[in-house]
C-alpha cells in the first residue's frame, strides 16, 4: 500500500508539472506575438513549402479522404521497409504482422475517415478555427501536446498493474527491430490518442502541422526500435560527442529505448520501469524516469514470457491464453511489469536445490 501511495503522489506531482508544459508553447507563442506586434490571425496557416503533384491533391482534401490516404500510405511504406527481422518464430511473426496490419491498415484509416465525417456534427462552428496559427508554432504546440500525452499513456500502463496487460504485448518481443515497433494489444491501440488528435486538429485547421508531427514522430520512434544502433557513432567518434549529448536528451534513440525493452534492470543498463519517452526523451529527464548509459542491453523482452498465443496477446481480454499461470490466461495473475514474486521465489528455491546437489 505504501508503494502504491508513493506512486500516486508522484503521478499527481508530475501531472501538475505536465499542465505547465502543455501551456508553455502556447504562452510562448502569444508572448512572441505581443513583443513583435505580429497578428497571424489576419492571414492563414499554409504549408511553408509546396508539395509536388499528387501530394498536393492529398493535402487539399485533408477534410475528406486525404488524411486516411496518408495514414494508409505511411503504414504500407513502414511495412515494406521494416519487416527485415529473420529471427521470428511463427507465433512472433504472426503477432508482429497482425499488430501492424490491423491497427495501421484498418483501425487508423477507419478512425481518420469517419472521425472527420463526425466532427462537423460535434463541433459545427469550429471548422478551421485555428488555421491562422503559423505552421512552425502549430508544429511545436502539437508535438508537445501529442508526445507528452503519449508519455503519460505509456507510463501509467507500466505503473498501474491492472493496465499493464494491455501494454505487455509490446514488451513480450525478445528482440528489437522495426517489425515490433507497432506490436500492441488492440485495446491499447484503440485508446491511443495520436490518431484521434490528428483527426481533431485537421478539422480545426491544423492538418498540415499535425501530419508533419505524425511523420517526424513515426521516423523517430521507428528508429528507436530499429535493430540497428544508429546512435553508436555519436558516442564513439569524439567530434560527434556534443551532438550525441544533445540528441540523446532530446529524442528517443536506440540506446535509451533499448533500455526500456531490456528484460532486466540488474545490469545497470536496462530500465524497463522508465525511459518512457516516445518521440522526446526529455520528458524522462524532467520527471526523473530516465537513465542514459550509452550502452545496449544484451537481452530483451519479459523474463517470464511464455510465448503466449498471438491471438491472446493481440486480443486479450476477449481471447485468453491457454498457457497455465500466464497473465493472459483465464484468472491469470496481475503482476505488473516486473517478474512475479512467486516466480522469484521459485527461482531462488531452484538455485538453492542446485547448490545443495
Image: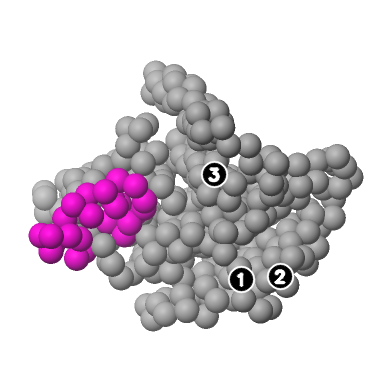
The residue that mark 3 highlights is 137
Q: Contact (CB < 8 A) between labels 2 and 1?
A: yes
Question: Which residue corresponds to mark 1?
Answer: 51
Mark 3: secondary structure: helix
Residue at image coords 26%, 48%: 246
**Image spot of residue 149 (x, y percent):** 54, 40
Q: Are marks 1 and 3 in contact (CB under 8 Å)?
A: no
Instruction: Judge depth for marks 3 and 2 and give the one in front.
Output: 3
Q: Position of residue 180 (x, y in %)?
A: 46, 66
Q: Nearer the viewer, residue 142 or 314?
A: 142
Place residue 239 in its image quadrant.
Answer: bottom left
Name the secondary structure under disc 2.
helix
Task: Classify residue 107 as left or right of residue 28.
Answer: right
Q: Main secondary structure of the magenta part?
A: helix
Residue 153 appears in the figure: no
- Of marks 2 and 1, the one in the foreground: 1
Q: Quadrant of the C terminus?
A: bottom left
> Which badge, 3 or 2, is on the more N-terminal residue?
2
Instruction: Look at 27% across and 66% down and name the residue there.
Output: 229
Point 36% across, 51% down: residue: 251
> Magenta residues?
232-259
Specify the label residue 58 is tagged with.
2
> Which numbered circle lies on residue 82?
none
Question: Could you say where residue 222 lies in the image, as x and y percent from the top left?
Answer: 44, 64
SS for dot 1: loop
Horizontal and vertical percent position of residue 117: 84, 55
Local packing at callout 3 (Cα closer than 10 Å; few below 14, some 14-19, many 20+) is some
Q: Number of labelled discs?
A: 3
Q: Which of the pair 337/181 is nearer the observer?
A: 181
Amino acid at each position: 500500500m505504501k508503494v502504491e501511495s508513493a506512486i500516486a503522489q508522484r503521478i499527481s506531482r508530475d501531472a501538475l508539472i505536465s499542465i505547465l508544459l502543455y501551456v508553455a508553447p502556447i504562452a510562448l507563442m502569444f508572448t512572441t506575438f505581443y513583443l513583435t506586434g505580429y497578428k497571424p490571425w489576419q492571414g492563414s496557416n499554409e504549408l511553408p513549402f509546396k508539395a509536388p503533384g499528387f501530394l498536393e491533391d492529398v493535402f487539399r482534401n485533408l477534410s475528406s479522404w486525404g488524411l486516411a490516404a496518408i495514414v494508409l500510405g505511411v503504414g504500407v511504406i513502414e511495412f515494406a521497409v521494416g519487416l527485415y527481422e529473420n529471427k521470428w518464430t511463427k507465433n512472433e511473426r504472426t503477432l508482429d504482422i497482425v499488430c501492424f496490419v490491423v491497427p495501421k491498415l484498418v483501425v487508423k484509416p477507419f478512425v481518420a475517415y469517419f472521425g472527420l465525417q463526425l466532427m462537423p456534427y460535434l463541433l459545427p462552428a469550429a471548422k478551421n478555427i485555428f488555421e491562422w496559427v503559423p505552421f512552425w508554432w502549430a508544429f511545436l504546440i502539437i508535438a508537445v501536446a501529442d508526445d507528452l500525452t503519449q508519455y503519460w499513456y505509456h507510463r501509467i500502463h507500466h505503473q498501474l498493474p491492472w493496465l499493464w496487460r494491455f501494454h505487455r504485448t509490446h514488451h513480450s518481443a525478445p528482440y528489437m527491430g522495426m517489425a515490433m515497433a507497432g506490436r500492441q494489444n488492440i485495446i491499447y491501440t484503440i485508446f491511443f490518442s495520436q490518431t484521434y488528435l490528428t483527426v481533431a486538429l485537421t478539422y480545426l485547421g491544423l492538418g498540415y502541422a499535425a501530419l508533419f508531427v505524425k511523420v517526424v514522430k513515426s521516423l523517430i520512434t521507428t528508429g528507436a526500435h530499429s535493430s540497428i544502433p544508429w546512435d553508436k557513432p555519436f558516442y564513439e567518434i569524439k567530434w560527434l560527442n556534443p551532438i550525441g549529448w544533445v540528441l540523446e536528451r532530446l529524442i528517443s534513440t536506440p540506446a535509451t529505448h533499448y533500455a526500456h525493452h531490456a528484460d532486466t534492470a540488474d545490469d545497470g543498463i536496462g530500465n524497463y520501469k522508465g525511459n518512457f519517452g516516445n518521440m522526446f526523451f526529455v520528458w524522462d529527464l524532467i520527471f526523473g524516469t530516465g537513465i542514459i548509459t550509452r550502452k545496449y542491453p544484451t537481452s530483451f523482452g519479459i523474463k517470464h514470457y511464455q510465448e503466449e498465443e498471438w491471438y491472446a496477446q493481440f486480443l486479450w481480454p476477449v481471447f485468453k491464453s491457454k498457457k497455465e499461470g500466464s497473465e493472459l490466461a483465464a484468472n491469470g495473475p496481475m503482476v505488473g511489469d516486473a517478474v512475479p514474486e512467486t516466480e522469484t521465489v521459485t527461482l531462488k528455491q531452484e538455485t538453492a536445490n542446485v547448490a545443495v546437489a
